[in-house]
Amino acid sequence: MEIVFNIAAPVFGLALLGYIAAHFGWLKEGAAQTLATFVFNFAAPALLFRAMARSPLPGDLPFDFLVAYYGSSLAVALLTWFVGKAVFRQGAMESVIAGMTGCFSNSVMFGIPLVLTAFGDAAAQPFFLLLAFHGILYFSTVTVALELVRAGGGGLLSTLIQSLKGILGNPLILALVIGIFWGETGWGLPAAADRFLDLLAQAVIPCALFSTGAALRQYRLAGNLMDSITVSFIKLIIHPLIVWVAAAWIFELPPLWTAVAVLLAAMPTGVNAYIFAERYGAWHRRAGSVVLLTSMAAIITVTLVLLLLGKPT
């Protein structure tokens, strides 16, 4: 049980502290959003750039690692879509949103703190490699699917162009790309720059978790709860299980890389799934419920995953 107290408990404890602070009004209005903005625009990009600049990519891009994670995530999305259509009789657009909530992990606010706390700096390269493709693959795929379903409601091409602009303007993606380039040059980082980035990076874990906990205060359980509970089960149990089978058994990846992929899959649903639902006016109440349910249940499920993974080398 050492792993519970040394890794999971402090991480979720920080999120709980943020929730309590928001619940009792100890934060000024908008404070949590400001803190999250600082993490997203400054602290997390500094962490990602520094990690990639100090760790050049392997000579050959590990496509088996990427396929193990994202192929599994696609399978989970299709499973969730099918369940929504066949079992809960959802419309096509609702099923697409449900599919995203079933496989889209909270990779920054929960993923970074938990993965790096659990596995240390050795996990940075495989984790940030997954993170480099996370937003690009999910956002572009879901946008195309939703626009195809909507069939001409605003124009697929213009929407894709806007999505591409948003992706290229994402500070996390920019930090990863620039960091990869810098790392491949072999220049290294000047001592002052490295220390500056390190100070920023140290703010990611406490600020991300505290602001995420505070943000969860705004979500409520709504809509058909059986839909939301089913998707939450798929996200927290089925998703990491399928990733583990693909990584450990099909592709036979190294234990550390397998553990990183499985732990990322075990993260609760990311808030961007809810944002997509709100934007398209489909399944938004249930998507909000999934974000809340998975974030609460992850205290138990992520702890179990950590116990099962142990300390990979």
Image (cartoon, rainbow, N blue to C red):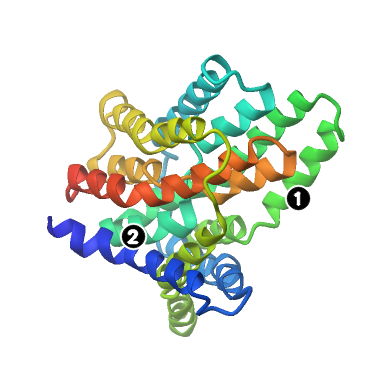
Q: Which mark is residue 115?
A: none
Q: Could you tell whether 14 is left or right of 8 in the image?
A: right
Tell me the distance, in whole angstroms, between the alpha carbons under discs 1 and 2.
Answer: 30 Å
On the question of residue 186 being in view, the answer is no
* Residue picked out by circle 2: 116
Give percent across and percent down for residue 178: 58, 60
Q: Residue at x 20, y 57 (%)?
A: 4
Judge whether residue 140 can be spotted in this image. yes
Q: Earlier in the sequence, mark 1 or mark 2?
A: 2
Q: Would you identify the image quadrant in which residue 158 lies? A: top right
Residue identified by numbered label 1? 165
The residue nearer to you, when weighing 45 against 1, is 1
Which residue is at a point 54% across and 65% down the rendered structure image?
45
As displayed, is residue 190 above or below residue 265?
below
Query: Where does residue 137 sit, x and y in percent of width and height?
Result: 59, 38
In the image as oriented, which residue stretches furthest toward the top? 86
Residue 117 vs 91, above or below: the answer is below
Who's the residue at 53% across and 38% down the image? 101
Q: Dot 1 surroundings within 10 Å: few (below 14), some, or many (20 or more)?
A: few
89, above or below 143, in the image:
above
User: In the drawing, does residue 140 fall left or right of residue 117?
Assistant: right
179 vs 224, nearest the viewer: 224
Q: Amino acid at mark 1?
A: Lys
Q: Decide: marks 1, 2 in contact (CB < 8 A)?
A: no
Residue 70 location, x and y as percent? 47, 33
Q: For the N terminus, which image quadrant?
A: bottom left
Circle 2: element type:
helix
The residue nearer to you, when weighing 160 against 219, is: 219
Secondary element at image label 1: helix
Against 71, residue 190 (above or below) is below
Q: Residues within 10 Å of mark 2 (few under 14, many from 20)?
A: some
Amino acid found under the numbered disc labelled 2: Leu
